[in-house]
Amino acid sequence: MRMLGYKKSFIFVLLILLVIIAFFLDSMRYFSLSGRVVNAKHALYVARKSIKWYKTQTGNYPLHLSTIQEYAKANNLSNRDPNTIRLFQHDLHQERITSFSGNSMEYNELNGQGGFFYNSNTGEVKLNITKPLKEYFWFYFLARNREEIPSEW
């Protein structure tokens, strides 16, 4: 009979450990997803700032987001001004919500394919993500912004 009590205790302790491990793994994943959301917001901010910078330099909106980097390289601007160096780094023009490795595709209509929506006539840029964050991160149930739609940022 005493052995049965030890087995119950062991199973109880094992269950508690499994719950703690599951909670720990969940919190790690949550922070990773939060980082991807923050990264996407930052990429959007940098893209918008780059477009404004390009317009002040040339008087026109760029035809594509990559045009900004090409212009800066052609005029050797990325090495001159430390305030604008970050605008030309390619990895900043990627969203990491739809793709962990980053998506820099550019579309001229909001179609939810990821990457960026860019209107070269108005200079408007948005994340091309038309569903709430919870659709992309099903495990993102602890976040306050899980109902937000990134194309509305």
Image (tube, grey):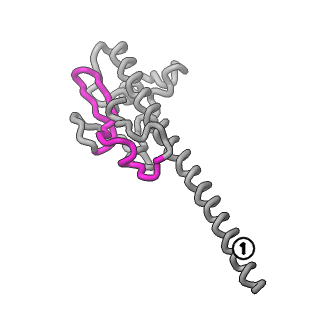
Q: Residue at x 62, y 54 (%)?
A: 24
Which is more toward the observer, 6 or 69? 6
Horizontal and vertical percent position of residue 127: 34, 35
Q: Is residue 29 left or right of residue 70?
A: right
Q: Is residue 7 left or right of residue 106?
A: right
Number of other residues with Cα within 10 Å of mark 1, as a class: few under 14, some 14 to 19, many 20 or more = few
Q: Name the secondary structure under disc 1.
A: helix
Which is more toward the observer, 14 or 64? 14
- Residue 98 vs 6, above or below: the answer is above
Which is more toward the observer, 123 or 53? 123
Horizontal and vertical percent position of residue 31: 55, 45
Segment colored magenta = 113-141
- Residue 9 vs 67, above or below: the answer is below
Q: Residue at x 39, y 28 (%)?
A: 47
Name the residue furthest front: 1
Horizontal and vertical percent position of residue 35: 52, 41
Magenta span includes 59: no
On the image, numbered disc 1 is attached to which residue? Answer: 9
- Residue 6 vs 98, above or below: the answer is below
Horizontal and vertical percent position of residue 148: 38, 36
Magenta span includes 133: yes
- Give the quarter of the figure containing the C terminus: top left
Q: Quadrant of residue 90?
A: top left
Q: Residue at x 70, y 68 (%)?
A: 13
Q: Is residue 57 left or right of residue 121?
A: right
**Disc 1 residue type (three-letter):** Ser
